[in-house]
Image: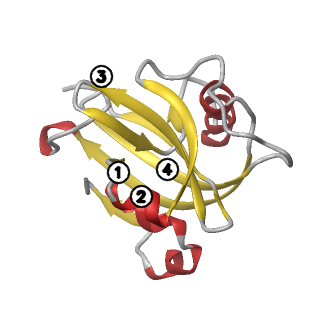
């Protein structure tokens, strides 16, 4: 039985836009929330601060836990996971420092080619993971959703 990987993801929404990692693979471009795997001895908040420094080039202020999502790789047609067959993601509301401009950090993921603010129209035709990330652009909806998302794509 493989290990279950814990991860933290940043939900950063400002002015009707969401900040996403811009990635590319053999099938084209796609987008994902910044963040990644927890290391031994880190809290999830520490994981998120480190991962954001690496991926989006700045530390974030971690605010509150919003949602929990699982990825069981065998159930999905696409996954960016390479190390684990099962990941539990904790999605936190986060705040950027004043004056932040999107750019890749020094430890960007291998598929990552940029960082972008995406508005609703830009999200319409984009491959976004998880798909529900498109709806995160509207914080007014967050209280209507269950905290636990399960293994949705």
Mark 1 and mark 4 lie on one chain; the one further toward the N terminus is 4
| SS under mark 1 | loop
Label 3 crowding class (10 Å Cα cut-off): few <14, some 14-19, many 20+? few
Disc 3 from disc 1: Cα separation:
22 Å
In the image, which is nearer the foreground, mark 3 or mark 2? 2
Residue at 62 percent across and 27 percent down: it is: 104
Q: Are marks 1 and 2 in contact (CB under 8 Å)?
A: yes
Disc 4 from disc 2: Cα separation:
22 Å
Q: Give whichever of 100, 107 is nearer the camera.
A: 100
| Vertical placement of residue 30 versus 91, above or below | above
Name the spot of residue 77 as percent of width and height, x first: 14, 41
| SS under mark 4 | strand
| Vertical placement of residue 151 versus 49, above or below | below
Residue 50 is tagged as: none
In the image, which is nearer the foreground, mark 1 or mark 4? 1
Mark 4 and mark 2 lie on one chain; the one further toward the N terminus is 4
User: Residue 133, can we see it?
Assistant: no
Query: Which residue does the numbered mark 3 point to in the structure image?
Result: 82
Q: Residue furthest right?
A: 98
Residue at 29 percent across and 44 percent down: it is: 71
Question: Residue 83's image quarter?
Answer: top left
Disc 1 from disc 4: Cα separation:
23 Å
Mark 3 and mark 1 lie on one chain; the one further toward the N terminus is 3
Name the spot of residue 50 as percent of width and height, x first: 67, 29
């Amino acid at each position: 039985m493989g290990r279950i990987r814990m991860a933290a993801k940043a939900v950063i929404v400002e002015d009707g836009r969401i900040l996403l990692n811009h990635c590319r693979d053999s099938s084209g471009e796609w987008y994902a929330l910044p963040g990644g795997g927890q290391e031994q001895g880190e809290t999830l908040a520490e994981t998120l601060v480190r991962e954001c420094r690496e991926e989006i080039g700045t530390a974030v202020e971690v605010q509150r836990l919003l949602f929990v999502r699982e990825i069981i790789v065998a159930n999905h047609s696409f996954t960016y996971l390479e190390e684990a067959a099962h990941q539990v993601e904790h999605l936190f509301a986060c705040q950027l420092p004043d004056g932040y401009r999107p750019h890749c950090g020094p430890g960007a993921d291998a598929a990552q080619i940029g960082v972008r603010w995406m508005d609703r129209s830009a999200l319409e035709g984009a491959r976004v993971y998880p798909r529900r990330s498109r709806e995160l652009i509207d914080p007014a909806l967050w209280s209507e959703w269950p905290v636990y998302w399960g293994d949705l794509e």
